[in-house]
Amino acid sequence: MTKEAETSKDTTTTSTNKSDKYKTKTILVAGGAGYIGTHIVVELLQAGFSNVVVIDNLCNSSREAIRRVEKITNANVTFYEVDIAKQPEAVNDICTKHRFYCCIHLAGLKAVGEKCPTPIAILPKQFAMHNELARVSQSEQMQQLHLSSTACVYGNAPVPYTEKDPAGHGLNSPYGKTKYFSEEIIRDFGIFFFFKKKKRGNPFLFFIF
C-alpha cells in the first residue's frame, strides 16, 4: 500500500470514528410525532442515531405515527406525551433523565389557519414553547438547538426566497409573525449560550431551518 493510500485510509477511519461517536449521542425531537417530525426521526434512526427521544402533545398527531416510525425503522422510539408550554417540570425531568446532546425543535401549531382566528389566545402558548426549549438548552451537555421555521418569515419578498432575503418585513399573518419572533428568541438565546459555553470549552451551536 502506498503512503498516499495509507493516509487516505487513516483519514476515512478517523472520519468514520468521529461520525460514530456522534451517533451515540441522545437527540430530542420536540414535536416529533407530526408530519415533518416523523420523517426526521426515521432519517435519524436509519442513519444510525439510536438514541432518539420524541416529545409531543399529540394535538396534531397520534401515537399511531410513532408506531409507524417504529415499523419502518424496526427500532424502538422513546416517546413522551407532554405539552411543553404547560408542563415545564415534565420537560425538566425528561432532560435530566436523558441528558440530550441536541434538540430539534418542531413543536408548535403547524398551519396558518390555526393561528389566524384567535392569535391573542395562541401567541402566549407559542412563545412559552420556544422559551422552555431555549431554557433547557442551558444544560451543560446540550450543544445544538435546531429550530424549524417557515418561508412565511420572508413576508412579501419576491419568490423564490433565499436565505439572503431579509426576514420580518411585510409579514401578513399571525403565523408568519410568531415564527419570526420565535427565530429572534432562539437567536438571542443561541448567541448568549454560544459565548457562555465557549468559555467552558463546550461551544453551543444553533440552527434555523
Image (cartoon, rainbow, N blue to C red):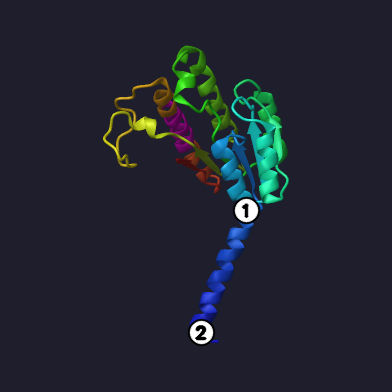
> Magenta region, mostly helix, strand or loop?
helix
Q: Where is residue 27 in the image (x, y as percent from the top left)?
A: 62, 44
Query: Looking at the image, which is closer to me, 25 or 80?
Result: 80
Q: In this view, does 93 lie to the left or right of 204?
A: right
Residue 187 x/y as whole percent: 44, 34
Is 174 situated left or right of 84 in this image?
left
- Residue 91 seen: yes
**Residue 161 lies in what quarter of the image?**
top left
Q: In which quarter of the image is the N terminus?
A: bottom right
Which mark, by number, is residue 177? Answer: none
Which span of residues is magenta-colored?
181-192
Instruction: Identify the residue at horizontal 67%, vertical 42% (top origin).
Output: 68
Which residue is labeled 1 in the image?
46
Q: Which amino acid does label 1 sit on?
A: Gln
Task: Kindly identify which residue carries mark 2.
Answer: 3
Q: What residue type is labelled 2?
A: Lys
